[in-house]
Amino acid sequence: MSTRCFLLLLWAVSAQADFFHFDSISNVSTYYFNYIYCNIWEGECQPNQDDATQQVPTRDIWAGFPQDYMSLLHQWYCSLGQCCESGDCRITNNITGLARDLQTKLHGQHLAESVVLKAIQGFINNPESNKPLTLSFHGWSGTGKNFVARIIADNLYRDGVKSECVRLFIAPFHFPHARLVDTYKGQLREAIRDMVLRCPQTLFIFDEAEKLHPGLIDAIKPFMDHYDNVDGVSYRRAIFLFLSNIGGATINDVALDFWHSGQNREDIGMEDLEHRLRAETMESQGGFAQSELMSGHLIDFFVPFLPLEYRHIKLCARDAYAARGLETDEATLDEVAKAMLYVPKEERLFSAQGCKSIPQRINFFLP
């Protein structure tokens, strides 16, 4: 479709829609004028990704478009050379990179590495999936839940967690007041709907999910269910990640039992954890366990993150030094690892802090 035809269509649609604001239309027009001037008319300008006039508008104006108009917009945008082989330059879906990063950057989490890779790869390779992909990460703080979420974002999206197709919600930060849960419901539903309309594949991350109000999760439960669409919008190409500390004690007990029996932690299988983890999650306190997300069996995979041992802490310290471009030796890595707190007190087996504090802790060991 020609640029002129598309602009006429955009004008016609906006003229008939009473929900558009003139300032929103102005922002959209400014973006496309700058894009056409720089790329079609080859004007003397250099588009700047940090310039708001050079970015695809992300305001609520998109929520007003039906999906067929959004598809038309996407086709026109691609005709201007702004799409990649994946159909959208924002989406990379680098499964090879995901496998490599999980294998080389994530330490001591053979179960998470295997389950996450299979789940993501299966979802990406099945465009006809009958529901969104919903994963629930469980384990102590510092074991790698947030780290894996970032790895997923980095390999599925060009701009990682900063992508306009990725949204992070932190329960105590974004939804702090129980009395405002009805307001939060509307805001959350609108935010998810708006992003799904703007991106053909989206990633939503809910950190500290155990602190979410049950009504808040139930409000978005239809988006994760087996529906063709919800109010005319399909959510089947969305990925939902829920991160929580629920089940951490159960996971640690299983790991400790294996250690006491002389078995390798790498021999721990999903069959040793999945049923117990699901049961503890159902019985735990908090909105996550009480929501219809659990009773409706909408979580595709419960992903356990094992407690980290001394050797894993050393690997995390090595990575932290390398990230700063610094060389180190085994003696220094031992010093960093020994400075951490371990439990149980008798065995000093598992790090109570995980790898989360390592980047700050190595500051004390720099010359």
Image (cartoon, rainbow, N blue to C red):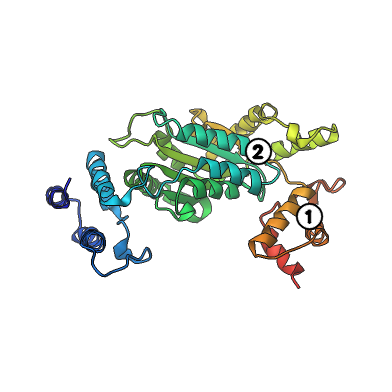
Quadrant location of the C terminus in the rendered image: bottom right
Residue 85 is situated, as x and y percent measured from the top left of the image, at 37, 43
Which quarter of the picture shows residue 102?
top right
Quarter of the image holding residue 209?
top right
- Numbered label tally: 2
In the rendered view of the protein, which quadrant contains the N terminus?
A: top left
Along the viewing direction, whichever of 338 and 127 lies nearer the viewer: 127
- Farthest bottom residue? 367
Q: Are marks 2 and 1 in contact (CB under 8 Å)?
A: no
Q: Which mark is residue 247?
A: 2
Q: Residue at x 72, y 63 (%)?
A: 361
Q: Is residue 200 above or below residue 164?
A: above
Three-letter amino acid code at the position of disc 2: Gly
Q: Can residue 292 be seen from the camera position used here? A: no
According to the picture, the residue beneath numbered tag 1 turns out to be 341
Residue located at (74% from left, 35% from top): 266
